[in-house]
Amino acid sequence: MNVNGKQYQSIWFDEALNSVNIIDQTCLPHKFETLILKTLEDTCHAIEAMQVRGAPLIGVAAAYGMYLALSENPEKVSPALERLLATRPTAVNLRWALERVEKALEEVSIERRSSVALATARELEREDMAICEKIGEHGATLLNEIWESKADKSAVLNVLTHCNAGALATVDWGTALSVIYKAAEKGIPVHVWVDETRPRNQGAALTCWELAQHGVSHTLIVDNAGGHLMQQGLVDCCVVGSDRTTITGDVCNKIGTYLKALAAHDNSIPFFVALPVSSIDFTLSDGVSEIPIEERSSEEVSHISGIAENGELLTVRMTVKDIAISNFAFDVTPARLISKIITEKGIFDAQESELLKLKT
């Protein structure tokens, strides 16, 4: 991703320093800071505190966590796997990546475990970048079709997105935002409506920051404005990401996605979901009843962080004390509301017969 004219990844391994590095996303958009992960617990904290977030990025970070754990103690494979698996329950890429590392470690001598784990993590890092770029290329063809069908070529292509499914949610490029970046590269005049995405405001803090860094036109909107914009003919399509998708095409994504899909369906607006095949859970068929939905701290709802006029970062409480708060982090959009699923292997309908083609 572009950061002030310099290329960065959300996570990377520095060979010279032998270090695992991340962008601390909890500091954005007010400060750009990087951190070095030194231990298993550093990695678990980074995932739990959302210094790294987004299903693909969580998976790669967990793989690097295994390397750091085995560098400390190469005998503790199982405890390290269990600790990392417990960090975030919803995103399936976490389990998928750890299974890749676990398989790579089969019949490997204790002395070689950390080096094999590192090699696997670096392989996953490279794969993720290539996968996300492919997702963008496939998805851009859909946006181009919509653009070509527009009668008024003096207008823009209005795309609505929810949460952050950009480079910050992956190693680089992103999923939903990769589609937008690739469309912009093709010369399509894309404008993005960015949902603020309460309660952590990933749209406001992260997606807007990313789009600005890449010079893509965008406007921040409150979470409940999407339906109104659709009714007014100001949205041409929606593109979102996914933390877990069932074999039948139900999509789990940031809370509020379901409501956007309902509004899009009611207004006959295409609703696209961009995701790597690794985000498909081939063991699940009913997203509503089978996908575990993470509940996060009530303080994410009762408090909000921002920057004061003097530049000081502040966190303030917005509610009365001791109020009852429910903070579900995700919801499930049924397959019937999804127009197409965009993957690195192509574009598919949200149905079992199609998604089974992706099972390897």
Image (spheres, helix red, strand yellow):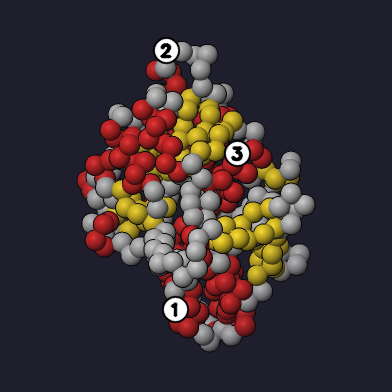
First along the sequence among labels 3 and 1: 1
First along the sequence among labels 2 and 3: 2
Please indicate, yes or no, whether residue 341 appears anywhere in the rendered image: no
Please indicate, yes or no, whether residue 159 appears anywhere in the rendered image: yes
Viewer-proximal residue, 201 or 85?
201
- Point 39% across, 63% down: residue: 326
Find residue 92 and report its horizontal and vertical position in percent.
39, 61
Label 3 secondary element: helix
What amino acid does circle 3 point to?
A: Leu
Q: Measure the C-alpha gap from mark 2 to mark 1.
A: 55 Å
Instruction: Look at discs 3 and 1 and give the one toward the viewer.
Output: 3
Tag 2 residue: 151
- Point 56% across, 84% down: residue: 74
- Is 1 left or right of 134, judged from the image as shown? right
Viewer-proximal residue, 121 or 196?
196
Label 2 secondary element: loop
Find residue 257 and report its horizontal and vertical position in percent.
38, 46
Tag 3 residue: 211
Q: Residue furthest front?
A: 320
- Is 122 left or right of 95, judged from the image as shown? right
Tag 1 residue: 82
Q: Which mark is residue 102?
A: none
Where 306 sits versus 148, above or below? below
Where 143 sits versus 114, above or below? above
Q: Measure the C-alpha gap from mark 2 to mark 3.
A: 26 Å
What amino acid does circle 2 point to?
A: Ala
| Quadrant assignment for the C terminus | bottom left
What amino acid does circle 1 point to?
A: Glu
Find residue 328 and report its horizontal and vertical position in percent.
39, 60
| Quadrant assignment for the N terminus | top right
First along the sequence among labels 2 and 1: 1
